[in-house]
Amino acid sequence: MKKIECLAMILAGGQGSRLGCLTKKIAKPAVPFGGKYRIIDFPLSNCANSGIETVGVLTQYRPLELHTYLGTGETWNLDRKNGGMFILPPYAREKGADWYKGTADAIYQNINFVENYDPEYVLILSGDHIYTMDYSWMLEEHKMNKADATIGVIRVPQKEASRFGIMTTDERGKILAFDEKPKQPKSDLASMGIYIFNWKLLKHYLEEDSIDSSSSHDFGKNIIPKMLDNKVRLYSYSFDGYWKDVGTIESLWEANMDLLKDTPSFDLGSAWRVYSATPSLPPHFIGPHAKIKNSLISSGAVIEGTVENSVIFSGVKVGANSKIINSVIMPFSRIAENVLIDKAIIAQNCEIMTNSKIMSNDGSVIVIAENEIITPINNGKKQVG
Amino acid sequence: MKKIECLAMILAGGQGSRLGCLTKKIAKPAVPFGGKYRIIDFPLSNCANSGIETVGVLTQYRPLELHTYLGTGETWNLDRKNGGMFILPPYAREKGADWYKGTADAIYQNINFVENYDPEYVLILSGDHIYTMDYSWMLEEHKMNKADATIGVIRVPQKEASRFGIMTTDERGKILAFDEKPKQPKSDLASMGIYIFNWKLLKHYLEEDSIDSSSSHDFGKNIIPKMLDNKVRLYSYSFDGYWKDVGTIESLWEANMDLLKDTPSFDLGSAWRVYSATPSLPPHFIGPHAKIKNSLISSGAVIEGTVENSVIFSGVKVGANSKIINSVIMPFSRIAENVLIDKAIIAQNCEIMTNSKIMSNDGSVIVIAENEIITPINNGKKQVG
Amino acid sequence: MNRVIGLINLEEDRQLIKEITTDRPIATVPFAGRYRLIDFILSNMVNSGIINVGILLPQKFGSVLDHIRSGKDWDLARRHEGLFYLPPVCAKNDSASCELSTFYKNIDFMKKSTQDYVLLSGGHTVFNMNFNNALRFHQNTNSDITIIYHKATHESSAPCTVLQCKENGLITDIANHSASYNDANISMGIYLMSRKTFIDIVEYAYERGGCDFLLDGIMRLHNKYNVYGYNYSGYVSTINSIHDYYKTNMDLLNPQIWQELFMDNSLIYTRTKNDIPAQYKSKAKVQNSLIANGCIIEGTVSNSILFRDVKIAKGAEIKNSIIMQGCTINEDALVENVICDKSVTISPQKWLKGAINYPFIVEKNTVI
Amino acid sequence: MNRVIGLINLEEDRQLIKEITTDRPIATVPFAGRYRLIDFILSNMVNSGIINVGILLPQKFGSVLDHIRSGKDWDLARRHEGLFYLPPVCAKNDSASCELSTFYKNIDFMKKSTQDYVLLSGGHTVFNMNFNNALRFHQNTNSDITIIYHKATHESSAPCTVLQCKENGLITDIANHSASYNDANISMGIYLMSRKTFIDIVEYAYERGGCDFLLDGIMRLHNKYNVYGYNYSGYVSTINSIHDYYKTNMDLLNPQIWQELFMDNSLIYTRTKNDIPAQYKSKAKVQNSLIANGCIIEGTVSNSILFRDVKIAKGAEIKNSIIMQGCTINEDALVENVICDKSVTISPQKWLKGAINYPFIVEKNTVI
């Protein structure tokens, strides 16, 4: 096969158990987002738009819906003759079979795949962040710094810093220290989980790590600290656009809300395209008595009631006199008449019967799992995973 | 998704350890065959030609090359919007992850996939047989017989019968007895490993089998005998075309030889298309002093020497004064000048140096593994497995 | 239905609808906020199980290739069979090409085909129909040619083809360019016949100087063949004029028709493009309208159809209008009873107003 | 090279090679046992990293669509960018369309494009070239327009475009329709320029009544622009006549040329079709020939090129010939110095013989 400069590997195998019932049947990267997207659309579109056309997607947990969605990669322009998108599940060898034991192990087990393309650099991404970013600029900086590895970083509020890998750098961005989820964060520079490595070096570290029985085979916990110990040239690449880890119900809800308002925090309509599979549905229909503001509405929806500050996916029905506020309604859920929904995430194909009321008392986000039927009787039912 | 009548599942996870060094790096269904094919081309083409356009391919062992070859399914016209080809590797669930423990278990673990399409019938195939067959006729017979399950059968020489699952049937094809690899075969009707089941019934048996700890989760060993015990309507469907299990080196070599001669036992050029990925290579070049007879030669090859009774794959080079007899030379292997090869299978990308001689003394088939370099010094080297 | 080959003829009398067909055939006129008219017949064929579809290109075929390309969006991009194009054959003397000569020039292809039947149709009718019942009807009668028709629901002077049928469906008379009356059997211009009959008619009619399949083929040979009519009772609208076009778009604001065409039956496919959900801002007021993805709405919209990527600025008001892809309606503009073709810009405070039965048409790329 | 848009112009003077171009442009003439001539320029563009290629369709474009379709086989079927077709614009008065008017009608498209450069080429040259060095040359000189040329290796009276270059590559004179002499700089008809320069030339030349990009554009504006020549030293053959066609096919029997064109550099892509390996039977005798997949050979073949699915029966003999796809040469026939177009059948015992410098051409579908 053709030698390529930079290949991307997207870690999409995690269960995302903090998303509760939203990931009972599907992998986290397949969770719907923003009216017509799924989370994995973001790293894949970023790759396509950055000119990276060889992408491995590492899957493990409940991949059927994810695999079906990924298809041939055509959605992201990644159905290429040379390269393109490859789904990389765990597999059996002559001597047996291994599941992916950690992020580093997943890449280690696919060294053969990477070697096929003999890349100079490998870009490691995760499948659960919402952002648009041109990786080619990061690669440029990596080359200019003559770095061995470059980590994407973003400033986070000091109080949240202990949830992330936190770095200390010199004025040129060279990384001096890296602490995974420190109790006392020394800075507010957090790792975005985006790494560029010189492949030869990474391969060496992966092989070494694979025989280290004490390792948990994780980039943040094992590979990066070991590289720092060995004085490898590690640089940071600062990103100051919108970036959000949607690993929890609250953050997933917030990220959806960030798309709304007259000037949204995250504007999907900016020049950078986020690709996603477009269903064959007609434009949505707004009924004669509907009222809609500060919302996103996708194709095939029928809105007869009121929608405010909400994200409505394809094929959703909202009946007359119903009111949807501060909520996310995922594809093909049907909201009958006279329903009130406030601050909720309704997963796909739910049916909310007439006169139901879905809102919490304590201000937390309510989640209704896929295919649920909610009647006025069980309507206080709170399902946060 | 759309309801479909009949869905096919191809078992392509086996290692094929009896193919020795040919399957060290690739799964058996990806082994090259017949000058430009791979074994999996046959069941996939049969599906496409039988009008079955929803096909699951169950993979497990070293699937990278197989997955890359399968790609989007476009080669077999199976890149469909509804249905098409799906690769189904083992996967993790909420409660952990399981490898495929047997042929029946592989289907059991993908019940969700099958249920998506809600088929009336499921066709189970294996990925290691060479034949062309119209499954729609078998399905017709299955329906006419009002059978619960139908097994494809072929008459085999009595002496070989103990290698197969052997059936006894009444005059209408109803199966009365089934013995998996019997020492004393009661008939010469062998199972071809092709099953049509009524999906609802099969699902029931798979679920029952999954909790039977004494079962080896195999169709031939467990599911079929249990169905017979329960007086389920099991019918046989007789096939009298060419069919060959290429599970061993000898049979793989024989099947290749069956393609040659003036009227070959198995004619690839018959009306029924076998699809395969076509490389972008020019027509092959026959040099001014070449001599070729009773052979198949594929694109991009350069033949300067003699080729008799052999199958030459794409991009193979045969130097002047070299002689290839009764052999199979897989893609891009280079045979230098003055080499003699007789009754051998040379895997991909080998280099056979000038003056080498590759032939066995005992009439068995010699195999050279992928990427080997053979010099006149190590040339007697025999590599059967 | 994979025993049927579909043929879509895009030659047409373009005079009827000229304002929005300067650069394209009627078949690729944008419709319903997202589609082109040809999407309906193409999707109907595919949803009926037809996997081999030929498109007779008109002279101005650029927009057809651009829209349909390989046929992938209709699942017709196949290694074997699938979509194929029949290029127009320029007649010697006049500039208009002629469907029979194109069929005749490509008759070898039809002769080699393995399908048993031919379903021939135009490309500018709006309907969602599965042809399998019509095929069964064709097989169960001794029909040589089956013409699919629908019942007229109102009188109209616009010319159409009216069929006289016996109770069993046998057609006794065909009147081309007739006026329509209530309950008349209006041909939908869809013909089902065996491949052999199709070839016989094309050869016979072309060799006798014919040009039109219906006039010179079926109508001249009416005595030789059993011609049957099959009644389709769903929603049907054939677009032959700007009036048809405007009215049919407005029909979609009837939820029953919208449901029937797009949601209840099989899906209507179209070229997929990347877009984002429609954005409603804080001052948006939208009622009784179809809104496509990619729209950004800050103003007021009622009884209208907005195609992809339309921007309605603050204070702007859209009423009873069809606004095609990429239009921008600026602050405080008023647009009523208007059809804006693609990429029109209306400047702030401009007022445009047509009549409800005579909409104002703004050409592609105009800035007002 | 994804900053370059490729344009392939299939308008040409078809008089030069008419026998095998009755129904197709030269660009889709079958070549080298498997390819069409256009495969070379298309593959070269793709292999150089160009992902946006426009094809100017000729009047007879059926075979072009049929061969290239969505561009998938060249990896040009993309959701964004990729392959696009520019339909021919019929001039009012004469039947031949004109490349400048087609460019001009599509100039909006070129204006909206995001690429920096345009690489314009014809579609009937056989070569395997990566354009990246030419682009670097273009960038490193102060070139406005770079014309790619090769050195003539022999004298010829066939008309071609001869360039006079200074040592640094600056072109001082362009002679169109010149005879060629040994070592002459023969233009390959490939022009590299900025998108802006391309648009300027098209607008200037078209608005002044021009038709030909070289004659009416570059040559008239030679004083305004710096025009440089870039010398390509690999194998080049432009097919302008049957003689060129025959000779270039025969060139491929030289293993060096076969290697250079198909194996040593990037691959040449073509429409993939399903076929089986060539079958050599017990009486086959084949020497110094190119044999495509799907052939069944029971007879004798020497110094010839057999396309896909050719059958050579027992006792038949083929010498110095080009036999295109699907031909059948029956028992004991003798075929020497012949070009058989597609699907020709030669009956048993027939003898056909042309001259080595004047091959006998048998038209498509003929039975002899």
Image (tube, coloured by chain):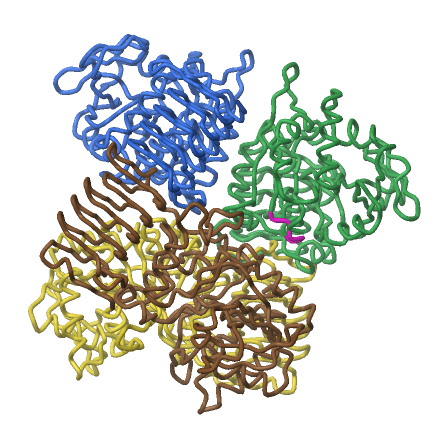
Chain colours: A brown, B yellow, C blue, D green
Question: Is D14 on the left or on the right of D133, as rendered?
Answer: left
Location of residue A342 by image quarter: bottom left
Q: Is residue A184 magenta?
A: no
Q: Is residue D48 magenta?
A: yes
Q: Name the residue nearer the viewer: A62 or A235.
A: A235
Question: Is C32 on the left or on the right of B354, as rendered?
Answer: left
Q: Which residues are magenta?
A: D47-51
Q: Position of residue D17 (x, y in %)?
A: 69, 32
The answer to whether residue C128 of the structure is visible from this angle is yes
Residue drawn 45% across the image and 45% down it: C274
Location of residue B151 by image quarter: bottom left
Q: Name the residue nearer the viewer: B281 or C311.
A: C311
Relative height, residue D58 to residue C165 (above, below): below
Q: Position of residue B116 (x, y in %)?
A: 24, 57
The answer to whether residue D330 of the structure is visible from this angle is no
Quadrant containing the N terminus of chain A in the rendered view? bottom right
Give the main secondary structure of the magenta stretch.
loop
Relative height, residue C53 to residue C57 (above, below): below
